[in-house]
Image (tube, helix red, strand yellow):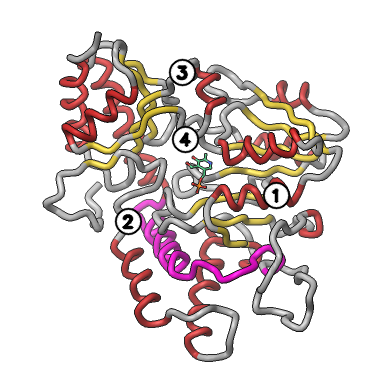
Amino acid sequence: MNIKSSKPQNNRMIYFDNAATTFPKPPAVIEAVVDYMTDIGANPGRAGHRLSIEAGKIVFQARKSLAKFFGVKNPMNVIFGSNATDSLNLAIKGVLSSGDHVITSSMEHNSVIRPLKRLETDGIITLTVLQGDEQGIISVSELDSAFRPDTKAVVLNHQSNVTGTVQPIKYVGEWCRSRNIIFIIDSAQSSGIIPIDIKEDNIDILCFTGHKNLYGPTGTSGMVVSDTFDIKKIKSIKEGGTGSLSDKIIQPDFLPDKFESGTLNVAGIAGLLKGIEFITGMPEGLKSVQLHKQTLQKYFIEKAAKRIPGFKSYSSVSGFGVVSFTIEGLSVSDITMRLSDDFNIMSRQGLHCAPMAHQRIGTFPEGTVRFSFSVFTTKTEVDIALEALKEISGDAK
Ligand SMILES: Cc1ncc(COP(=O)(O)O)c(C=O)c1O
């Protein structure tokens, strides 16, 4: 793929930590942030002056684009947050209450499992963690055996940030729908790679992050609520100023204000809007993204398995550009340190905030090295990394 990025042409740094946050960002994203900061700067929905209205228009346009992107009719069902963790905490703590049973998977990020564990430790909920197959993919038979009359919700990571494992959300959604169970999706990794339609996929609440595969700035995320979901079933976990109903000392009960207290990250949202336009404007939309990432992933794994002694990949073959690996005789931190210090290649080592996923795939507690590619990653960069790893593998004991 040859797409214009904001990466300086003379910069030989190679960035393979896109699952943490994508870098570089498309130039239009950066321009939108700067334009807002330079020419608008005002607080949306807080005043009637022109600049406040301009800021409000940007936020509304972003809501509209995101609603369309995720298959929701009402843009007000997009509730902005500061990161996926923030939106997931709202969804999980907003929906669950005393006596509820919740089903989740072994592939969850700490952004899901820690809020759930907190509720479990406080004696509010009971929790079942499904192990899934060797890739962590859960099945209907596991769901059936975990089901209880008090099961309130299934909370599921759509795409693993460790292995790239993709959960079959459509049939999990059908399973939930037929039992009147609330289906909450963590799409932090999948949004911008895998098409998601909240209605078709029977999702009640989806939490996305803006700074990964949607190519927006850090500090952006959202909780998207299905058009048919009764918002009375979600409690607010934060209250405060909304710019609406200012004469009332009680939080408004309509969307998005019920959950959006305090000034929004308008600069970030302006960038996120351009990130969505960037990703949907690819020649074949998300298909181009998938093809590019899968091609690089396959190429890297095949070449590495042939050229690097002791190389072992833990990635799902159907994943999208997330490769977790180890090299026998080397610690994962030695590998990433040498990649960074000697080859200017940025990657990540360890558990990637998903310890249960490593227990599932057998890489706990050391974890793996993770290379994660973006639409800006080139085959030449992958070739340079392969050479670097070959040299580093010479240090193996
Ligand atoms: C699957 C998954 N869920 C949640 C998160 C948390 O995202 P954020 O950093 O935006 O809170 C991440 C981040 O890596 C992730 O990979």
Q: Disc 1 marks which residue? A: 204
Badge 1, how many Cα within 10 Å: few under 14, some, many 20+? many
Image quadrant in which the C terminus is located: top left
Q: For the residues marked 1 and 2, what is the alpha-carbon distance in whole angstroms?
A: 30 Å
> Relative to residue 94, is residue 291 drawn left or right?
left
Tell which tag, 4 or 3, sits nearer the viewer: 3
Residue 259 painted magenta: yes
Name the disc covering residue 25, or none.
2
Name the disc covering residue 161, or none.
4
Q: Amino acid at mark 1?
A: Asp
Residue beneath the point at 61% across and 69% down: 262
Seen in the picture, residue 367 relative to 98 is either above or below; the reply is above
Residue 209 painted magenta: no
Mark before the other along the chain sequence, 4 or 3: 4
Mark before the other along the chain sequence, 2 or 3: 2
Mark before the other along the chain sequence, 2 or 4: 2
Mark before the other along the chain sequence, 4 or 1: 4
Q: For the residues marked 1 and 3, what is the alpha-carbon distance in whole angstroms?
A: 33 Å
Q: Position of residue 77 (x, y in %)?
A: 65, 63
> Relative to residue 369, is residue 173 drawn left or right?
right
Seen in the picture, residue 126 relative to 53 is either above or below; the reply is above
Whether label 4 touches label 1, CB < 8 Å: no
Q: Disc 3 marks which residue? A: 363
Q: Position of residue 180 (x, y in %)?
A: 81, 42
Q: For the residues marked 4 and 1, what is the alpha-carbon distance in whole angstroms?
A: 22 Å
Label 3 element class: loop
**In terms of depth relative to the viewer, which is nearer, 193 or 212?**
212
Badge 2, how many Cα within 10 Å: few under 14, some, many 20+? many
Residue beneath the point at 68% across and 63% down: 259
Q: Amino acid at mark 3?
A: Thr
Mark 3 within 8 Å of ligand 1, using the beta carbon: no
